């Protein structure tokens, strides 16, 4: 599988300023996040709500801190749009990614997601019926083929509260989509959905386009599930944390990435309340946990 793993470590600004709950870290300036990121030794950062979305403005800001743009979340609407309409809708996002030399296009289906709605319990997630799956897969494959032609790797984000959350849904997703449809392997969302990230990596190596590493506090997750509370209630209460601070074993995950010769970004992230979980301190400990796993794997 190629000649060994080549990874660069990045971070998601969501720990500093949350994208779904704008009051979490709402008063933290972008400069604080970027300075912390650069000083901790990360090579790149994903987009967040505080980032300007045009290249002439964003490039000098990132250059000042010596950071690459990794890309950023795109809210897809492929269950409502056909392929052509979806391609028209993503042009601005794609132009920004291309202008800043990004390698991945991160995409999640959001037409019917419950994850940004604090009033919807996690059990109320949308489920696709047998007739919709092939349509979903066919359209996603069409968009991914287009993104590939434009020189970026399409990375679908399986995510709590969406139509691709569980292990069974991810298997169906692979069956219905072409190999141009890569995924964001996200350890935290995998854990919530009962997905084994090591197994997925080894079974579908050609699909691993991007990696998000976050950890889970199982007691909080169990409590949220028992109350059928929302995904965002889970975020506020600390369901997620950084690698090394929860229940997930990262040595086998990094080992599996090494085995498939993964080349790309590994992003430390955890949706947490920055008032309770100091973003800089948590990002630093998450990065150091992953560095330790890389040493174990080598």
Image (spheres, rainbow, N blue to C red):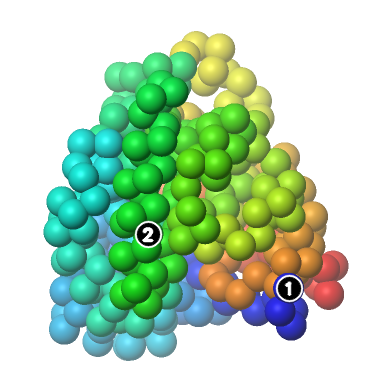
Residue 9: name its quadrant.
bottom right
| Horizontal relation, residue 213 to residue 117: left or right | right
Number of marks present in the image shown = 2
| Horizontal relation, residue 274 to residue 239: left or right | left
User: Is disc 1 surrounded by few (<14), some (14 to 19) or many (20+) residues within 10 Å?
Assistant: few
Above or below for 13 versus 121:
below
Circle 1 residue: 1
Residue 270: x and y in percent read: 51, 49
Above or below for 88 versus 241:
below
Would you say residue 147 is visible in this rendering?
yes
Residue 175: x and y in percent read: 55, 41
Q: CA distance from mark 2 to mark 1?
A: 22 Å
Residue 8: x and y in percent read: 57, 76
Circle 2 residue: 144
Looking at the image, which residue is at 56% across and 49% down? 186
Would you say residue 20 is visible in this rendering?
no
Q: Quadrant of the C terminus?
A: bottom right
Looking at the image, which residue is at 44% across and 23% down? 130
Q: Nearer the viewer, residue 127 or 97?
A: 127
| Horizontal relation, residue 192 to residue 46: left or right | right
């Amino acid at each position: 599988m190629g000649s060994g793993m080549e990874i660069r470590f990045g971070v998601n600004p969501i720990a500093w300023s949350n994208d779904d709950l704008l009051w979490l870290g709402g008063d933290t300036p972008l400069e604080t996040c970027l300075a912390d990121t650069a000083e901790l030794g990360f090579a790149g950062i994903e987009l967040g709500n505080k980032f300007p979305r045009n290249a002439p403005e964003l490039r000098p800001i990132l250059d000042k801190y010596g950071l690459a743009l990794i890309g950023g979340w795109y809210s897809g609407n492929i269950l409502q749009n056909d392929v052509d309409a979806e391609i028209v809708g993503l042009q601005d996002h794609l132009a920004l990614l291309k202008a800043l030399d990004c390698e991945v296009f991160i995409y999640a289906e959001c037409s019917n997601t419950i994850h940004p709605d604090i009033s919807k319990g996690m059990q109320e997630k949308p489920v696709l019926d047998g007739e919709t799956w092939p349509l979903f897969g066919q359209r996603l494959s069409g968009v991914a083929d287009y993104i590939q032609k434009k020189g970026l790797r399409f990375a679908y984000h399986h995510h709590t509260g969406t139509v691709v959350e569980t292990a069974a849904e991810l298997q169906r997703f692979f069956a219905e989509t072409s190999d141009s449809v890569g995924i964001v392997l996200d350890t935290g969302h995998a854990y919530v959905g009962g997905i084994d990230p090591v197994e997925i990596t080894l079974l579908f190596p050609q699909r691993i386009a991007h990696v998000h590493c976050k950890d889970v506090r199982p007691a909080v997750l169990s409590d949220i599930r028992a109350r059928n509370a929302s995904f965002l209630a889970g975020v506020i209460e600390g369901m997620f944390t950084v690698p090394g601070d929860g229940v997930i074993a990262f040595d086998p995950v990094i080992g599996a990435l090494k085995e498939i010769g993964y080349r790309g970004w590994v992003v430390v992230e955890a949706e947490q309340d920055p008032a309770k979980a100091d973003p800089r301190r948590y990002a630093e400990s998450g990065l150091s946990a992953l560095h330790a796993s890389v040493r174990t794997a080598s």
